[in-house]
Image (cartoon, grey):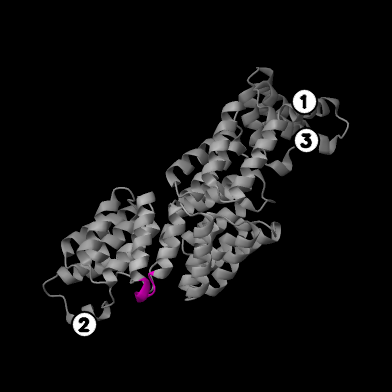
Amino acid sequence: MEVAARDMADMRWSLGEVDLCLAQLRQIPRAHRTTRDWARMARCASALDQKEEAAGFYSEVLKAQPNAAEALAATKDVSEKTHDGVAAVARCLALMRQFDYVGAGSELRRLGHRHRASARIVALQATCRFNLGEDRQARVLFEKAVAMDDALFDEMGAYTALLARMGDRLGVYSLGRRLLRADAARAEGWVAMARYLEMTGRAQDSLAVAWKAQALAPRLADAFLAEGSAQMAAASYADAATAFLRAHALAPSAYSYAVVVDALVRGERLKDAFVYAREAAELMPRHPAALAMVGSVLAHSAESADKAERLLVAALDLDQRNEAAVAALAALFVAAGRLPDAVALLERHLAEIPTDDMYTRYADVLTLANDLPGAAVSYAEALSINPENARARAGHDRVDRLMLPNASHESDDEEGEHPVESPMNSDFSDAL
């Protein structure tokens, strides 16, 4: 494959097709590229006016040939021209560390207008959108960044988490394969493969791959996030909380706060969960996910149900697509016996959040309201989106039995648990 890629690159270079030459050389795994490959890629990128990428390729040349005149001149020129851009990116990263994702995103957009936007700048914009819960916009930006540089590693942990949150197993797998082809010695590809294994029900295999990623990059927060997700899938909530807290200590973000709170709630460490949720709300007072975190924790106490409802409604006022807030508020209504309110809430948000989990929740509530035909349709819709949704499958089978005139009481007893979760055990991770 490498020989063929080099031969094709040579042909494209001789024809002056520098963009196609660069594309051919990108197919060679990073670890197998020669100094000649890096130099040719740098010249192609320079010809395409991709100055920052060219500087990166020339830097690889300098590792092998420290006195290469062409590479020294090129990196010096780019360094001088991009000094202001580098300083601007540093300011954006500082804003992100302060959880000011709106401000950072605005700065990055302006930076992209002033300078030719690089794949990294676009990926950072995507990460801001991801942490703001704007998943659709984040995905568009991540796809744009990868199209600009298919060997991009920056922010790929956030891209993996986004695809997993959206339930796109194929997308997670494809991303992992691309990253591993680019450089299997880096941890990002193994993080994506760990998430893919977890999403396909192979939690123990996922753990092994996450640990491999940690061995490759002991300070990569994404590797610990992958371990935490695998532990959650295995219902090992204490171990999941430990892994998530390690990730949070390495690189705190809105996303890491959300998964930490979820793991602590699942592990019935409600006081600790409230501490982190409140801290997130103080750092991000206008962030809908932070309000939803606090509301979801408070919903586990009957005494604070009214306050929880107010916070969850406020979160939805800020973001109608906040699935965590919808789930927690619906569970709160069910626990209070307000089934019509729960049905109306879920109906109102289904158009904005048409996920298999949302259809499953809606069907659960319709079952409790004795609207069995409607529940059957909603369970079927959930299964059409995700055929492996075990909760939707069990609910659909149960409704089928309830609608049969000869259904036995014994069957009802066997499946007698309510399919809708109460606020005491609501699945906050559905929206993570």
Q: Is residue 224 left or right of residue 217?
A: left
Q: Residue at x 17, y 79 (%)?
A: 408
Q: Which residues are magenta?
A: 299-304
Crowd rating for badge 3 (residues with CA inside 10 Å; few <14, some 14–19, many 20+): many
Residue 77 numbered mark, or none: 1
Q: Could you say whether the residue bearing mark 1 is in a helix, strand or loop? A: helix
- Visible residue check, residue 170: yes
Amino acid of disc 1: Asp
> Could you tell me residue 351's position as x and y percent?
29, 48
> Could you tell me residue 323's position as x and y percent?
38, 56
Of badges 3 and 1, the one in the foreground is: 1
Q: How far apart are the alpha carbons under marks 3 and 2?
A: 71 Å
Crowd rating for badge 2 (residues with CA inside 10 Å; few <14, some 14–19, many 20+): few
Q: Is residue 398 left or right of residue 163?
A: left
Q: Is residue 374 left or right of residue 13?
A: left
Residue indicated by mark 2: 410
Residue 59 numbered mark, or none: 3
Crowd rating for badge 1 (residues with CA inside 10 Å; few <14, some 14–19, many 20+): few
